[in-house]
Image: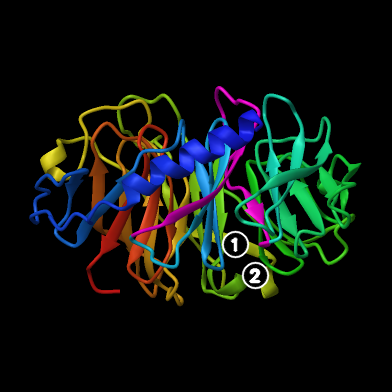
Amino acid sequence: MTSRSVLRRLLLALVATMVALPPTTATAALDAAPTTGGFASDNVEHVKHIPLSTNGVGGRLIGKYFYTNDQNKIMIFDVSEPVNPELVGVLPMPQEFQFSREDIDGNGQILVVPNTVTRVVYIIDVEDKTNPRIVGEVAGAAQHTTSCVLDCTFAYGSDGNIIDIRKPSKPKLLKQSWGDGPGVVTSSGHDVEEVRPGVVLTASQPIQLLDASNPVRPRLLALGSNPDGRFIHTPRWPQGGRDDFLLMAGETTFNLRCSEKSAAFMTWDATRWKKTGTFSMIDEYRMSNGVPTDGNVPGGRNCSSHWHEAHPRFRDGGLVAAAFFEFGTRFIDVSSKGKIKEIGYFLPYAGSTSAVYWITDEIAYAVDYNRGIDILRFTGKV
């Protein structure tokens, strides 16, 4: 039996005992009374904690499976029962000691996973969820994030790489700059997100909307920029790129105290880009220092936004779940005019939340660098 098989069996056995525990029923008072997992507002219930990750950083829900990763492995959960996810597959990966791969992507048959230490992009066959396996590698092609384009027949790296994965077992690096297409002004960013087939939104400064129907030579459709030139971390556009709002976020690491320079969650106007070729910021939201019973922390390594996700019923406004490192998960209401208001939170004990994913209309998974996965139920009005 190989070492990978042994590790897979051990992890499957371990998680079986963890997820069999009954869900936590405690909820917090309005002013953030403690739960078994952390402090929470009265409309957020901490359901369960799954402490399997080492530096847990990201994930992706595809169908009834949740794919998540940390420094040294890929895990596949069957989320048919969202509050009792079943770990069905594990793949050990080369160790990443920091800046682990974020925002992994796939289509249900393959995952595209970069590694920031080996500099390799790995193509992983996940058709058999119980036996994920590496089937292709692209040496020297890894960038901080790598995202699928056109149903994972191509992939875009955050700094410009374009990879042909039409044959997953024989992926090829085609070029090192998606930024040399017509009108594209930069090939460097933190992430790219295909909002619908052939249409890509970039986390860059400026923000760019690209027509990637010809994936080797994308064409610029629209731009959006900030006068302060802030770093853009997360690009999201609900309703397959047809919503009135872009939902964006920045990142500022190792800032112990919150200030006006701390990275914010932002809304951007996406109603006029076809006429003007531009997006413009509407509102922004930052954390403030405080105490846990107020839902805040007095200080931390990162007073910053990170990854976020719109609620499945987000339509030109609505609910967003957003990760804010030591400030945990914040539930944010976006009005029909794009104005931002926090309406709930979960502040984990000794946590640093990287990303949050809606699994159902009420269940969200918070992936945490320190804790693994916290399963949350939002009980407020959506």
| The N terminus lies in quadrant | top right
Q: Position of residue 134 (x, y in %)?
A: 74, 42
Note whether 158 is above or below 271 in the view shown. above
Query: Which residue is drawn at the image coordinates 14% and 35% (left, top)?
Result: 291
Asked if residue 102 lies in the magenta stretch, the reply is yes
Q: Is residue 54 left or right of residue 192?
A: left
Foreground pick, 126 / 182: 126
First in sequence, mark 1 or 2: give its number: 2
Residue type at numbered disc 2? Trp
Is residue 26 rendered to the left or right of residue 308?
left
Q: Nearer the viewer, residue 281 or 41?
A: 41
Residue drawn at (55%, 44%), measured in percent from left and top?
A: 233
> Disc 1 and disc 2: Cα gap in Å?
6 Å
- For the residue marked with disc 1, what is the amino acid? Phe
> Which residues are drawn in magenta?
84-108
Numbered mark located on residue 279 in the image = 1
Q: Is residue 344 above or below residue 354?
A: below
Say if residue 374 shows up in the picture: no
Rendered image: mark on residue 273:
2
